[in-house]
Image (spheres, grey):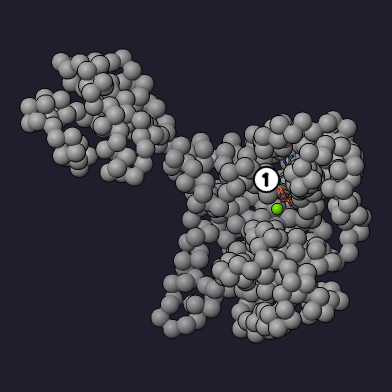
Amino acid sequence: PEIIEHLRVEHELSNVSFNTWIQPLKVYDVVDNTVFILVNMNASVEYIEKKYQLPLKVCIAETTGTEYDVVFISEDDDRLNEIQNMAIEANQKKKSKSAAEKAGLNPKYTFDTFVVGGNNNFAHAASLAVAESPGEVYNPLFLYGGVGLGKTHLMHSIAHFILDKNPKKKVLYVTSETFTNELIEALKNGKTAGNESAMSKFRDKYRNNDVLLIDDIQFIIGKESTQEEFFHTFNHLHTSGKQIIISSDKPPKDIETLEARLRTRFEWGLIADISSPNYETRMAILQKKIELDHLEKYNIPNDVLEYIATNVKTNIRELEGSLNKLIALYKLNNNESIDIALAAEALKDIISSDNKREVTPELILDIVSDHFGVSIADLKGGKRNAEIVFPRQIAMYLIRNMTETSLKAVGVILGGKDHSTIKHGIEKIENELQADETLSNTINIIKKKINPA
Ligand code: ADP
Ligand code: MG
């Protein structure tokens, strides 16, 4: 109505033309960015189109702030059903998208983008089976394997698959860090008077699910209260036939500080490992990444891909990282061709880190960047927003504590900050650590990622 009024005023339509042509129009449906408008059987679609399509388009854009295509369609058009189906489908897609977002999922981590090879075909098949029949086949599903081999990717794929099929399913993906930190908060708030419900809110969140995925369970190991709470969460879900999916860097039998009762439960379902990919799989993953990221335009020669696949063996994240680095170097030295020399340059830091890696400031920056999803450039830069300042201060603290680096040198590594900024940042983290249990949990997890024992 607002739009129609706008049209009437803007175009100074006479009452007669307004009442004859515009008033009877009805919005039939909106699909993506197209508005379908229903035209009375007795009116001429062509005439209305010619005369009012553009003005209407402009009015809609002015009133809603979004540009829509306007399509007029007669009441007796055969396409009406088709359009309605399109609208329903688009709506469902939107819903499942927001469900996937709500569940904290990376849209890129799906079964479609996962390359199956000898190293992961068992884990892949088990994941697919669980995704097709959650709660009915393997419960829990326990995925384990080294860093960067695709555990998180597979877990997100399962969650996407389930939500795509049924957006109403309650699917929750969390890292064990989130689980622990939310538990700590709930316990703390539960103690302050009059806030009895913090714990019950926590329990609702974790128990009221059809599918619960806990990533990197190794990080809750050794925390008694967390293991205790997770034990109850597990039992609650399992007895009501809800699916649990867990990932870890080791199989349950090798996790030393895991309580026996949890170990037994983790072994109830199916345990599947992911190992390092062989050469063919590494090549296939590189090809897939080129396709997904639209890198064909760079015409990367095959011998360069072979060089990367030969040299980066044990970590798929690094395999992808090498390709990104190669492209970045290529753009930096513009016009130079992509050849093995450039690839060798791109792999310089990565190949040596394949062997026993040393804790360096660069490694710490890398892991902090990955953990918080903040770029290394931002860690080194000068942005002042909390989402960046906090990880930056954590990086200062860890570099200072885990390597032999002077305050001044930490400043240089972090993009040329002065000694007092660094000192202040480190002190801030040290002070907060005294009071904030979730921060100390987070710091411990990052330390374990830097230096897995
Ligand atoms: P993990 O959780 O085991 O440390 P991730 O799932 O985070 O490893 O995987 C690291 C990166 O490698 C991600 O970008 C992921 O998409 C990619 N990756 C891992 N395995 C595969 C695979 N089989 N096919 C395609 N990409 C993969
Ligand atoms: Mg992971």
Residue at 47 percent across and 72 percent down: it is 198
Is residue 54 something that shows in the picture? yes
Quadrant assignment, res 417: bottom right
In depth, the one of 200 and 302 nearer the eye is 302
Give the class, few, some or many, for how many residues have Cα within 10 Å of label 1's Cα (few <14, many ≥20). Answer: some
Local secondary structure at mark 1: helix
Q: Residue at x 77, y 42 (%)?
A: 334
Left or right of 192 on screen, residue 352 = right
**Residue for point 7% across, 31% down:** 15
Residue 382 versus residue 302: which sits nearer the camera?
382
Quarter occupied by residue 220: bottom right
User: Does residue 333 appear left or right of residue 114 in this picture?
Assistant: right
Residue 426 rendering spot, x and y as whole percentages: 70, 80
Above or below, 366 relative to 433: above
Q: Can see residue 396? A: no
Instruction: Name the residue that disc number 1 marks.
Output: 153
Quarter holding the C terminus is bottom right
